[in-house]
Amino acid sequence: MVVPVRDRAESVGRVVTGVLTQTFSDTEIVVVDDGSSDATVAAARAAGDGRVRVIQQEPGGVALATAAGLEAARGRWAAVLDADTEVSAVWLARMGRLVDSTGARFATCGGEQRHVDGSSTEISPRAGSSDPLAGACLRSGAFVTETRLLRTAAARFHEEPPHADANPTAVIGGEALRAVLDDDGVVARTPERLVRWSDHLMIPPMDGDELRLDWAFQALDVLARSPIPDAGLLARYATIGGVAAARLRRRTESRMLFRVACLSQPEVRKHWGRLAVSYLAPISDRVWNPLDDEVVDPAEPVAGPVAEPDDEVTVDLTDPADAETPR
C-alpha cells in the first residue's frame, strides 16, 4: 500500500492502523512524506510495526510522492491510499478473493463518501458502461492492480502531467486500467462498500500530547472494529495515549488507556506498573510531569508506596515512560 501524505499528522495514523488490522496481513505500507512541516512522520511511525516504511522527500506534490512510493513498493500488487480514506477490516481479503476467483489483473470496489454536513453518498463501480473507465471506481483505496502498471502510469503522469486540477490517483489508476484492457486482461468489480472517504475538515492543528492522545483514540477506534484486533498494536497505542493523558493530567483517560494495555498484554509487567503509577497522582506527576528543576530519571524506580494489582503480578516501575512518544 502506498500512502502519499503531507501535513496530515492528525489522520495518517488512522490510515496506517486500518491497513495493519486487515484480516489479510501479508502486506506492507509505504508512507511517502512529501515535505511535511508537522508531526506526520511521527504519526506514521507510531505503530512501531516493521511492515510500515516511511520515505521522506522535499515537497514535490502528490503525483511525485505516489511515484516514489510505487518505486519503493516490493509487492506484486499495490493500491494507493490518501489520509482521508478509511478501509474496512476485510478490504484486502475481499479484494484478494475477487482477484483469485476471477483471475483479474485489476479489481475495484465500492465505497461511501462522507460529507461535512453528516450526509453520505454511496459510490459503486458500474458494469456494462460504454466507457470502460466508468465501470471502475478510481478513488483512493477503491482499486488494486499490478504494481508495475501503477509505476508506469505514475511515471507518465510525472513526465506529462494532465491539467492542473487532475486527481493523480484517478489518472494513474485509469492509465493502469487501460493497460489491462488493452492487453485483454480481466477487470473484476464488486459493489461492496469497502472504503470510506471523508471530506477534509479544516480543524485547529494539535500538537504534542494532545496530538498523541488523538492518535491513540483513533487507532483504538479502528482496532475495535477489527474481527481479531492485534494485541501488541492495542497495547502500544494505549500506552502512547496513556502517557500523553498522564502528562495532560487527564487522569481518568490515562487510567482507562493503561488498563487497555494491561488487558491486551497482561503478561507485560510494565503495563501494570504504569497503571499503578497512574493511580498515585503525586508520583504520576513526578514521572511524567517533572518540574523544571526536578528531572526524574524514568529508568530509576519511583520511591513511594505501590499498589499491587489483584493478581499479585509484581509491579515493575523501571522505565515507566518507555514508548511514551513515537520517534
Image: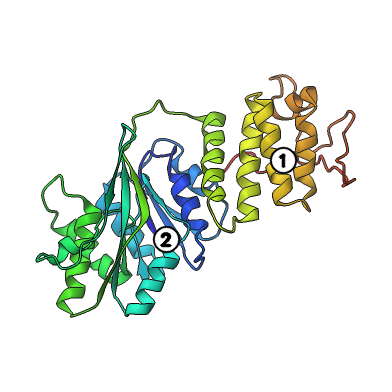
Quarter containing the N terminus: bottom left
Classify mark 2: helix, strand or loop: helix
- Give, as a three-letter code, the residue at label 2: Trp
Q: Which residue is mark 1?
A: 259
**Image quadrant of residue 242?**
top right
Q: Is residue 260 visible?
A: yes
What residue sits 36% from the left and 72% below the top? 98
In this figure, what is the number of numbered marks? Answer: 2
**Height in image: 52 above or below 121?**
below
What residue sits 84% from the left and 36% below the top? 301
Residue 54 rendering spot, x and y as whole percentages: 45, 53
Labels 2 and 1: the sequence-earlier one? 2
Nearer-the-camera pick, 29 or 224:
224
Bin the neighbour count of mark 2 within 10 Å (Cα to Cα): few under 14, some 14-19, many 20 and up.
many
Q: CA distance from mark 2 to mark 1?
A: 30 Å
Residue 286 placement, left or right of 125: right
Residue 179 placement, left or right of 3: left
The label on residue 91 is 2
**Image quadrant of residue 190?**
bottom left
What residue sits 38% from the left and 67% below the top? 95
Nearer-the-camera pick, 194 or 279:
194
Q: Is residue 295 visible?
A: no
